[in-house]
């Protein structure tokens, strides 16, 4: 480990840190620290080396609560993953959120890790995490991408570019994007709210830019609207082992069924894309149809129509379709 400055800050200090960062006044690379389960890992590996670490856990007073109004679920960014997964209304009214959280990581990590940190976790691409590899455009812009011709079994097949094929690794973000969540961002000019689907970026020619956040901006909360599909929702995660493992493929799905017809459906895919991935074309294909295997298989095919595979990750296109079909079938069998 290398020397760095550590400060525990409050909301006002976070705001002035954001203002200074945006004006480029600090001249230092600054990182926020929540649970630390991503940040400290990457600092120890030497992948990240912020000069200043601002501990935001003191902001839990403002951004550490869960509230439920009937119309909307609000999750503070400093809520721990385990607290959200265990929350009564999250479990009964938004099962896809509870399942995406409890199928992630380990109980110890879920007790430490925050929701804000979770959506901003970094890719598990080993070439990114190990600075000994020289070619990684995300870590070292312009250096190339070792994964494209290298070991890429766990890499993405949707949203990829010639510059990066790293998969977005988290689970919770898929639930948020499927349910049309929005996110509050505190920055130099106060708080702005954007659709969660606008937060993450595909790599394009700048894989080092993963989100639209400006320097110093802080995620403070997530809002999830209640809809006729939120109770009939689930998260299906396929991985190499049944616990403590990232997704090879996952599907966050939600459906509004009426008179045995699909009135509305929400689909997000994980493990297969460079960012949390909403499968809107597949949704359009399903709306108005009768639920069942033929419709679900056709929609799953559409969801992966744009896949760009390599020899190492070709299996994900087939596995992804099967996972989505299975998730949709399970949805229709849910008793609500
Ligand atoms: C062994 C292991 C297995 C795991 N398995 C899974 C898994 O299966 N599924 C899964 O989804 N995750 C998994 N994770 C990832 C884990 O869930 C994340 O590390 C965790 O959620 C990050 O939250 P944190 O509070 O610890 O973030 P931190 O490490 O504190 O922060 C992460 C990043 O977000 C920034 N940040 C944090 N909070 C904010 C905020 N409010 N606003 C702006 N920036 C912020 C930090 O500066 C940092 O860049 C695993 C992690 C480990 C170590
Ligand atoms: S896939 Fe992305 S993160 Fe991995 S080596 Fe290539 S550029 Fe780096």
Image (cartoon, grey):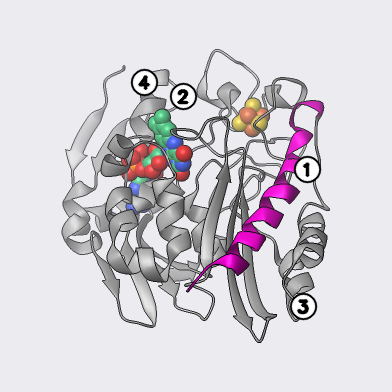
Real-space CA distance between mark 2 and mark 4, rounded to the nearest whole angstrom: 8 Å
Question: Which of pointers 2 and 3 indicates the residue nearer the eye?
Answer: 3
Indicate yes or no: mark 3 CB to ligand 1 under 8 Å: no
Q: Nearer the viewer, residue 216 or 302?
A: 302
63 relative position to 271: left or right: left
Location of residue 52 by image quarter: top left
Element type at marker 4?
helix
Residue 125 picture quarter: top right
- The crowd level at tag 2 (other Cα within 10 Å; few <14, some 14-19, many 20+) is some
Task: Locate residue 67, reporting x and y percent.
Answer: 27, 71
How crowded is the residue under tag 1: few (<14 C-alpha within 10 Å), some, or many (20+)?
Answer: few
Circle 2: element type: loop
Looking at the image, do the residues carrying marks 4 and 3 touch, with CB atoms under 8 Å apart? no
Q: How busy is the neighbourhood of tag 4: few (under 14 within 10 Å), some, or many (20 plus)?
A: few
Horizontal and vertical percent position of residue 167: 62, 39
Q: Which mark is residue 318?
A: 1
Give the residue displayed 51% in from the left and 24% down from the top.
129
Query: Which quadrant would residue 19 be assigned to in this image?
Result: bottom left
Mark 3 surroundings: few (<14), some (14-19) or many (≥20) residues within 10 A: some
Segment tinted magenta in the rendering: 311-336
Cα separation between marks 2 and 3: 48 Å
Which residue occupies the foreground of this view, 19 or 25?
19
Disc 2 marks which residue?
47
Check if residue 298 falls in the magenta segment.
Answer: no
Q: Identify the residue under disc 4.
A: 44
Q: Report which residue position mark 3 lands on.
A: 289
Query: Extreme bottom residue here?
Result: 259
Location of residue 26 with respect to 295 vertically, above or below: above
**In x, y percent, where is residue 222?**
39, 65
């Amino acid at each position: 480990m290398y020397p760095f400055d550590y400060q525990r800050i409050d909301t006002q200090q976070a705001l002035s840190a954001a203002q200074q960062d945006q004006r480029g006044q600090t001249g230092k690379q600054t990182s926020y620290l929540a649970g630390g389960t991503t940040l400290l890992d990457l600092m120890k590996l030497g992948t990240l080396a912020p000069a200043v670490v601002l501990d935001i856990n003191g902001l839990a007073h403002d951004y550490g609560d869960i509230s439920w109004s009937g119309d909307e679920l609000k999750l503070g960014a400093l809520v721990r993953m385990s607290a959200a997964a265990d929350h009564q209304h999250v479990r009964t009214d938004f099962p896809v959120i509870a399942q995406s959280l409890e199928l992630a990581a380990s109980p110890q990590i879920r007790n430490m890790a925050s929701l804000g940190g979770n959506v901003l976790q970094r890719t598990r691409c080993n070439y990114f995490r190990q600075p000994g590899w020289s070619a990684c455009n995300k870590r070292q812009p312009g250096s190339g991408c070792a994964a494209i011709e290298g070991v890429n079994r766990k890499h993405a097949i949707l949203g990829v570019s010639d510059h990066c094929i790293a998969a977005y690794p988290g689970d919770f973000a898929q639930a948020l994007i499927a349910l049309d969540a929005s996110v509050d961002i505190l920055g130099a000019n106060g708080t702005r709210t954007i659709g969660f689907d606008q937060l993450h970026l595909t790599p394009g020619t700048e894989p080092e830019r993963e989100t639209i956040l400006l320097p110093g901006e802080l995620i403070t909360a997530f809002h999830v609207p209640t809809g006729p599909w939120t109770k009939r929702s689930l998260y299906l995660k396929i991985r190499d082992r049944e616990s403590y493992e990232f997704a090879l493929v996952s599907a966050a799905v939600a459906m509004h069924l009426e008179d045995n017809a699909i009135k509305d459906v929400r689909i997000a895919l994980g493990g297969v894309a460079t960012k949390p991935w909403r499968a809107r074309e597949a949704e359009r294909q399903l709306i108005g149809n009768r639920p069942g295997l033929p419709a679900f298989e056709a929609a799953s095919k559409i969801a992966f129509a744009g896949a760009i595979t390599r020899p190492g990750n070709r299996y994900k296109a087939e596995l992804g379709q099967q996972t989505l079909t299975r998730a949709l079938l399970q949805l229709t069998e849910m008793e609500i």
